[in-house]
Amino acid sequence: MKIVVLKFGGTSVGTVDRIKKVANIIISYFRKRYKVIVVSSAMAGATNDLIKKSKKISNNFNLSEHDVLVSSGEQIACSLIAGRLNHLGYKSQSYMGWQLPIITDGKYGSSRIVEIDKKKINKFLKSGGIPVIAGFQGINMDKRITTLGRGGSDASAIMISKFFKSEKCVIYTDVDGVYTTDPNILKKAKKIKIISYEEMLEMASLGAKVMQPASIQDARLNRIDIDVKSSFIKKNGTKITKKKNILSNKIIRGISFTKNDAKVTLLGVKDKPGIAASIFKPLSNNAINVDMVVQNISTNGKETDLTFTIKSEDLIKTQKLIKKNTKINFRDLIVDNNVSKVSIIGVGMVTTPGVTYRMFQALAKKNINILVISTSEIKISVLINKKNVSKAISALHKEFKLNV
Amino acid sequence: MKIVVLKFGGTSVGTVDRIKKVANIIISYFRKRYKVIVVSSAMAGATNDLIKKSKKISNNFNLSEHDVLVSSGEQIACSLIAGRLNHLGYKSQSYMGWQLPIITDGKYGSSRIVEIDKKKINKFLKSGGIPVIAGFQGINMDKRITTLGRGGSDASAIMISKFFKSEKCVIYTDVDGVYTTDPNILKKAKKIKIISYEEMLEMASLGAKVMQPASIQDARLNRIDIDVKSSFIKKNGTKITKKKNILSNKIIRGISFTKNDAKVTLLGVKDKPGIAASIFKPLSNNAINVDMVVQNISTNGKETDLTFTIKSEDLIKTQKLIKKNTKINFRDLIVDNNVSKVSIIGVGMVTTPGVTYRMFQALAKKNINILVISTSEIKISVLINKKNVSKAISALHKEFKLNV
């Protein structure tokens, strides 16, 4: 008999009524003669409520106790799901991280799962039971609770799929799949039936909040097929799988964008070896993430202009850090808080010439000015004025025929 | 260094502000150079909210999963207390039942603690830490969570006191001690400074809801002194200790009463051996608790009258069970749903003659009719009409000089 892992996110188990619906979904798999392992997040809102409490207790709440606190939410959701399955006549039992145990690398607040003891679950599955495992949590070697970071229940589901060699892993959420772009921005956005891990990673980290990027990476490394589906409506979702399985003739699979970026330009920087490192080290030390970086070729070999993007919320801090940085010398500092990064993504582009040209041409036709460009094997990103985002997405969606 | 166990009830940790106050109380003991072990209940209301959810999921929620569900409340309270102590610069850590572990007899919903592994706590105490242990919970031999029943955090505190041989166990609650009677009924009620386990047991099971009776019994068996105190106001509370320590010259220590009793009388019961058992067996099988029982001496050796009391809520069920009971034969069934039991309690009465007379005399003077009487070594109870309860308590309080 084959194993399926079903993971339910916070909104999917957000109310008692939702939990009843989720139980019915679980049963539908069980009736298809799957061995079903359920992984659940906390009920939507529960974790945020707990975090609020912790902030009232301390503005610097102990990390270890924070993990004890927030992991209680999954305990509630899992016991209610198991209780519902029992009520409907199915054998089910909840399992917290410590009960298997699920062993993590021990980092509070952002652990990774390193080992899962399978004995209890295998025994329970063999007896015809449906185990409901708490997502988001494990324990370290000292038996202290450690959590996996925001969206960590995805990581739980993927690692459980890996250890139990599940046939598939279904991520139930409140969206019905991954779209070519955000349907709120472009109505014509279409659901993607199948997408590669690599493309999904680019989509996820660029703003498509369907799954935690680290989990997609784990799935890729372990070759685990993922179905992303809605627990609210019965519809086919999006399958995330390896490149080989993708038989699409589309070069570009999706368009993603950011909402809150800022551009920083240093004019007339004294050009000497190690200058970029001198600029970026203090930012990195202050947990400021630098995204796109462009350094102009210096015309005289002495001065250069350096442009980079950061999150808008980091702009003030960044300006301060640069101004008090004695290791660098520059003529002027220009910032622009009204920019967005728009990216086209597709594994096909690496073998298809002319994609960059088509992108630039499509934007030019709409009079959209490109401020910065960066490219990778499966992605081309341009920085544009925020006011042009919607127009740009529409133009690119049409150019690469994503709505057909 | 001596160990003190501090237990905080649900209202004591009911809000974030309350938890901050509780942390200060804990620190005041720590500064007196005690080794402090904290035991906490769930935040007030939390457990009831969870039970409500479980009832929406199933009218017959799985007992084992119910224990998983409701034990999450203590996890939240304990991590917040430990987090607060950390914030204030004290080393503290929360411990769930499974982390020690605390082993129970395994009965879901009403377990008793059979063993506590002391290693981790002793090590933590030795390092100068303040452990915060979740009350109400333990695990069984299969590592499933089991809870100790309503008010079970008291049981946790007492058993932790026993295993760690604590010098004292302080039960912090929302009342400031045990009173001679309910201050809501009689304003002149006085706080009792010191009371024996036996007296407290009679007070507790008769309505003074300060501590779970089973915990008082555990404390008595293990000779653990208990201080009952308020976490809301700084005042001396009530000490519960062994008889020997009580140097009071009062014969009677307190007056308790019930609110919802019913009296059932069977007239003209055919008097033969085993008749009482025939009457009470079906009641017992239906979880109906029979309290006072009086059987008149049969005048002719053939017929007798039998009177007993039950909880009001069981009256209808009791009447049905008696009427369909084919093993008994009686002339008439009379019920009275307007009765209350008033009891005077004191370990001194066993060596003092005339207590019963004084009680009856005091009630007679106020024209209060006694319906049923029952006595034990340290308690005399009378059943009276409900409307006379307040008058009776006042008269008895005066007669036995409880307000001086």
Image: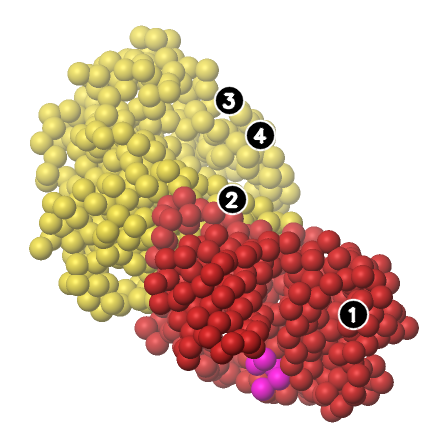
Chain colours: A red, B yellow
Provide the chain ID for the residue under circle 1. A
CA–CA distance in space, label 4 to label 1? 79 Å
Query: Is residue B298 shown left or right of residue A127?
Result: left
CA–CA distance in space, label 4 to label 3? 16 Å
Confirm whether residue A56 shows in the render. Answer: yes
Q: Are marks 1 and 2 in contact (CB under 8 Å)?
A: no
- Tag 1: residue type? Thr
Provide the chain ID for the residue under circle 4. B
**Which region shows up in magenta?**
A217-221
Taking the spot 49% from the left edge, 34% from the top edge, the residue there is: B311
CA–CA distance in space, label 3 to label 2? 30 Å
Taking the spot 34% from the left edge, 24% from the top edge, the residue there is: B182
What residue does disc 3 label? B338
Q: Are marks 3 and 2 on the same chain?
A: yes
- Tag 2: residue type? Asn
The circle drawn on residue B333 is: 4
- Tag 4: residue type? Leu
Residue A388, percent across and down? 75, 57
Confirm whether residue B370 shows in the render. Answer: no
Vertical arrangement, residue B188 with respect to residue A317, above or below? above
CA–CA distance in space, label 3 to label 1? 73 Å
Sequence order check: which comes first, mark 3 or mark 2? 2
Q: Main secondary structure of the magenta part?
A: helix
- The mark closer to the camera, 3 or 1, is 1
Q: Quadrant of residue A217?
A: bottom right
- Quadrant of the image for the C terminus of chain B? top left
What residue does disc 1 label? A180
Farthest-out residue, front: A300
CA–CA distance in space, label 4 to label 2? 39 Å
Sequence order check: which comes first, mark 4 or mark 3? 4
